[in-house]
Amino acid sequence: MNLLFAWRYFRSKKTTNAINIIAWISVTAIAVGTASLIIILSVFNGFEELVKSLYGDFYASVKVVPAKRKTLHINTHQIQQIKAIKNIQAFDFVVEEKALLTGASQTIVTVKGVGDHYNSVNHIEQYIRRGSFDLGNVEYPSVVMGAGIENAVGANILRVLEPLTLYFPNKNAAFNSTEGLNAFNVLPSGTFVIQQEFDNKYIFTNLPFLKYMLNLKADEFSAIEFRTDLKAEQIVQKTLQKILGPSVKVLTRYEQNPSLYAVMQTEKWVIYAILSLILVVAAFNMVGALTMLVLEKQKDIAVLKAMGADEQRISAIFLLEGLLLAGIGTGIGFALGGTICLLQDYFHLLKLGGSTFIIDHYPVKSYATDYLLVLVTVTTIAVTAAWFTARKASVQLYALR
């Protein structure tokens, strides 16, 4: 019954046309705010998925690193225990070290030596833009470098290949010795492009060569990288920690980059809070529309009270009126925002400025939880705004004239 009254008040023609205009302005404002929230949250989801996929292809699902020292030692028995873990799809040993790479010019790089199974752990091979993922061997090493490093040293694998030189610190040399660096010529075999952080920092080579250059023992590594399903990461992490003990730290993909994921989430919620202010402004319009409607329906309120309607019923009618305005606006906003996201996802209407090797358009990804969040937000704001007007309408005295 209360909803019927609210619906009739919404549809009925008012004596003052401004009431209808203000009501539809409030509906439009809510629709625009709702659509904006849906679109922005979907765009943030799209960028988050893109960044996670890029980092997920470069970083391992789970990574074992030394807890205190620079390298870790792993014995044959521990390797057998690791192989027995069911949720591990693949794993490989890696060694990382900073070095000086020289060609036409020089730059500091992080050299990552990887084994034969690294392509099963990491998807970097699909980001090769020139050449191939060929790392050579211990006698004839090759390197795969980021595009930024390729430019920094003046290398170009599409031309006649000229060797580059890698310089590593010699940890066995005396402090004042002239043999403080180990040097070796390497051939560039491929260039990858993922994103600037990786492209300007990393080069890859084969593990035996890097261990030889750093004078590492057979059981000595910088880290062990694992590939596993996202749902199994926590299980694998706990199992590995139990096997390898307190001398190592076992990190999931999120723990390897905690600041990145924290920043992404913070930015998303800050934008959500800012855009929610649009709905607060819309709520003021709704309060104005309901207040004018109360003034318009003074006689109806007096009649209802004379017929025995209590304050709760009067309050409920105008509260539902407010929710009706908010519901219509939210429905329009959901339809508008969802349609725009769908069109962007399929037709890539809005392009990114500049050039990129990954995508040329704004990515979008809609989740049902975002729609639920926006619905709860709109409902909370609408109920809060409508309650004050509805309460005032229920307690005020109106006379029949």
Image (cartoon, helix red, strand yellow):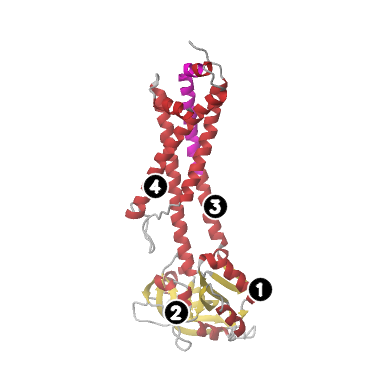
Residue 168: x and y, percent?
54, 81
Q: Main secondary structure of the magenta part?
A: helix
Q: In the drawing, what numbered circle is on residue 266?
A: 3
Q: Is residue 75 visible?
A: no
The residue under the point 54% across, 67% down is: 232
Range of magenta residues? 274-302
Residue 138: x and y, percent?
48, 87
The residue under the point 58% across, 66% down is: 234
Above or below, 3 relative to 333: above
Q: Badge 3: how crowded within 10 Å, few (<14), some, or many (20+)?
A: few
Q: How far apart are the alpha carbons under marks 1 and 4?
A: 50 Å
CB atoms at circles 1 and 2 under 8 Å apart? no
Q: In the drawing, what numbered circle is on residue 214?
A: none
Above or below, 51 relative to 13: below
Examine the structure image and report whether residue 327 is included in the region drawn in magenta: no
User: Label 4 is placed on what type of residue?
Assistant: Gly
Closest to the observer, 242 or 153: 242
CB atoms at circles 1 and 4 under 8 Å apart? no
Q: How far apart are the alpha carbons under marks 4 and 3?
A: 24 Å
Q: How far apart are the alpha carbons under marks 1 and 3?
A: 31 Å
Residue that numbered label 4 is attached to: 338
Residue that numbered label 2 is attached to: 143
Residue that numbered label 1 is attached to: 68
Determine whether the residue tagged by mark 1 lies in a helix, strand or loop. Answer: loop
User: Label 3 is placed on what type of residue?
Assistant: Thr
Sooner in the amino-acid sequence: mark 2 or mark 4: 2
Closest to the observer, 154 or 258: 258
User: Label 1 is placed on what type of residue?
Assistant: Lys
Q: Badge 4: how crowded within 10 Å, few (<14), some, or many (20+)?
A: some
Residue 308: x and y, percent?
54, 19
Depth check, mark 4 against mark 3: the one in front is: 4
Determine whether the residue tagged by mark 3 lies in a helix, strand or loop. Answer: helix
